[in-house]
Image (cartoon, rainbow, N blue to C red):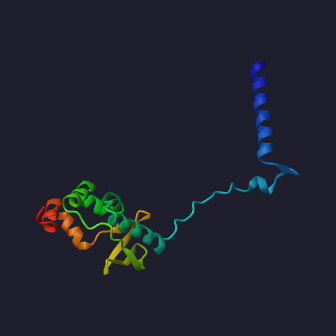
Amino acid sequence: MRKIGIITLAVAAALVVTGLVAYPLVNGEPTAAAIQPNPVKQPAAPAAPTLPEAQKVMQESVDSYAAGDYASAWALWVPEAKKLFSLENYLRLHTECPGITGIKFEIKSGRLDNPTTATFRIERAGFLFTYQARYVDGAWWFQPEKDDMADYRKGVSYLIKKRCPSA
């Protein structure tokens, strides 16, 4: 019995000391510091998509393509385009039907059409093209053109025959 009494007394003393440390009292009342909730740090709101971020991805995409680094260019595609046409098919297309490499693309202008779409006018070898980037799942991605997407649906063999009939 004596051990139980000593343990009970020790636990009670610990609770009193903890209470005094956790809730300092002034004249028997808790201080303001004792009753303030702990500050909760809210996560920062995600930044709104910006044109410079979209332009950076667009430039990386066209630079990769111009250098013949097709794997890196494909990696910057919007997710649904990657699902439609695999990296293996894209590399096969450009192996069996090589494009022109070494001619740089220059972004002439760009605009945000809405919070998830940016449009760019890009020059290559004196010709102007229009390409889009889309903001999906918190990142900007290159959006292949509608005609290309339609061709990708038809498969890599179709594309090779269409683009390089002699292949």
| Quarter-of-image position of residue 57 | bottom left
Picture coordinates of residue 114 (x, y %)? Answer: 41, 77
How many marks overall? 0
Q: Nearer the viewer, residue 34 or 141?
A: 141
Name above or below for residue 73 compared with residue 26.
below
Up/down of 61 relative to 26, above or below? below
Residue 162 left/right relative to 76 = left
Identified at 37% across, 67% down, the residue is 63
The residue sitting at 60% across, 60% down in the picture is: 42
Q: Measured from the top left, where is residue 100 in percent x and y?
A: 26, 68
Q: Is residue 49 among what the camera can see?
A: no
Q: Position of residue 92 (x, y in %)?
A: 21, 56
Residue 122: x, y in percent? 36, 77
Is residue 125 in view from this perspective? yes
Residue 140, image quadrant: bottom left
| Residue placed furthest toward the right | 27
Report the side of 158 relative to 133 (left or right).
Answer: left
Query: Which residue is at a point 33% across and 60% down the rendered structure image?
Result: 69
Q: Considering the image in quadrants, where does the C terminus appear?
A: bottom left
In the image: residue 127, left or right of residue 92: right
For the N terminus, which image quadrant?
Answer: top right
Q: What is the quadrant of residue 14 in the picture?
A: top right
Nearer the observer, 84 or 104: 104
Q: Residue furthest front?
A: 102
- Of the pair 47 and 123, the residue shown nearer to us: 123
Extreme-left residue of the structure? 166
